[in-house]
Image (cartoon, rainbow, N blue to C red):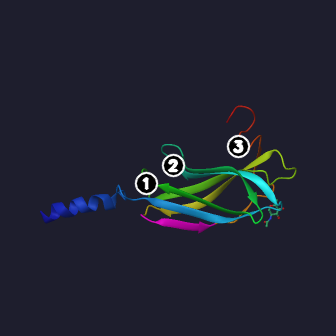
Amino acid sequence: MVRLFFSFLAFPILFGHVESVATKFVFTGNFVCDMPDFEYRMVLWEKDSSSGDDVMTIQGPKVSRDPHYYEITGEQDGDEITTSAYEAYMVIVHSCTHPEKPYRKLSVPLGEFPFRDKTYYKSVDINLTNQGKLVTNIMGYEGFSGK
Ligand SMILES: *[C@@H]1O[C@H](CO)[C@@H](O)[C@H](O)[C@H]1NC(C)=O
């Protein structure tokens, strides 16, 4: 009976997956941009090799004004049990470019975060000035295919 009890207890621990585990993320920082204001749209992603990446949060399109502080939060509930950590990144489409249009799209890795029932806080400063791949609009489309 004691052994049975412990094996039930050990199961969720071994697989790192309990229903109540909610991992939260708070990313903050400054955009480095030499312009007083610019437009941006930011998407926080969790990289998931088995089923395609998950969107955690979409922010904007909105205007950033000097000083260019940002904050984006997200949450994951432990649906991926093949690895032991979340890998987060964000994609920013912005107009901190010279000339101001078209937009540029930049992908920024944010690191790996072990599955825990906790909130991770991380500060990341991001240089946007002329950074990223040229795209046709604030949604990040490349060309006219809608992708
Ligand atoms: C930001 O990137 C631009 C363009 O590559 C570069 O000229 C500038 O020096 C960078 N600024 C900082 C603070 O790294």
Q: CA distance from mark 1 to mark 2?
A: 13 Å
Give the residue type at disc 1: Asp
Return the residue at label 2. Answer: 48
Closer to the chain start, of discs 2 and 3, is 2
Query: Where does label 3 land, which residue?
Result: 140
Compute the Cα span from label 1 to label 3.
28 Å
Judged by its main secondary structure, the magenta piece is strand
Q: Position of residue 46 (x, y in %)?
A: 54, 52
Give, as a three-letter code, the residue at label 2: Asp
Task: Using residue 84 as the reference point, say whether residue 111 is left or right of it.
Answer: right
Compute the Cα span from label 2 to label 3: 21 Å
Residue at (76%, 48%) from the top-left corner?
104
Residue 86 appears anywhere in the view: yes
| Marks 1 and 3, the one that precedes in the sequence | 1
Q: Where does the magenta region start and end? A: 117-123
Q: Label 1 crowding class (10 Å Cα cut-off): few <14, some 14-19, many 20+?
A: some
